[in-house]
Amino acid sequence: MPENVERKTRRRAPAQTAEAPPPMLKDQLLTRVETAKLLRISPQSLANWVSIGRVGLPYIRLGPGRGGRVVYRLSDVERFILANLHGAPAGAVAEGAKEN
């Protein structure tokens, strides 16, 4: 390499230290289809049940009006499943909640 040629080197950007997101934002968001698969129902049934208030499953609307996309927090879906579990011993529900 000739002596008069400067060598170009890439400089790495300094590591950014971002604050941890609030706990609410750490939760995985599920689409209506993913949520319906977990509950083993059709996406349309889930949409109908939520719209008429048949199930107490919280959701997040991403966008204005009726056309906004709807997502569900995984923790809310898990809580919904545990709250609607019937026929299991009381200790089994508490143990299942502790494992997650």
Image (spheres, rainbow, N blue to C red):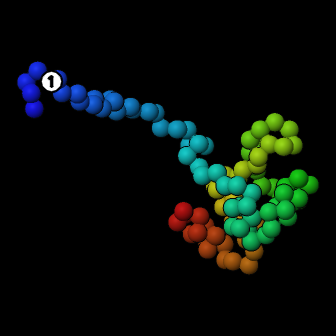
Which quadrant of the rendered structure holds the C terminus? bottom right
Q: Residue furthest left?
A: 3
Which quadrant of the rendered structure holds the N terminus? top left
Q: Answer above or below: position of 62 versus 11.
A: below
The kind of residue tagged 1 is Val
| Residue drawn at (76%, 48%) of the image | 70
Residue 66 in the image: x percent, y percent? 87, 43
Q: Residue furthest front?
A: 2
Question: Quarter of the image holding residue 61?
Answer: top right
Q: Answer above or below: position of 65 versus 33.
A: above
- Residue 31 is left or right of residue 64, and the answer is left
Residue sitting nearer the eye, 24 or 31: 31
Residue 4 in the image: x percent, y percent? 11, 21
Give the SS element for disc 1. Answer: loop
Whether residue 56 is visible here, answered yes or no, is: yes
| Residue drawn at (55%, 46%) of the image | 26
Residue 10 in the image: x percent, y percent? 27, 31
| Residue drawn at (38%, 31%) of the image | 16
Q: Residue furthest right?
A: 52
- Circle 1 residue: 5
| Residue drawn at (7%, 24%) of the image | 3
Whether residue 76 is visible here, answered yes or no, is: no
- Residue 100 is left or right of residue 16, and the answer is right
Question: Quarter of the image holding residue 44?
Answer: bottom right
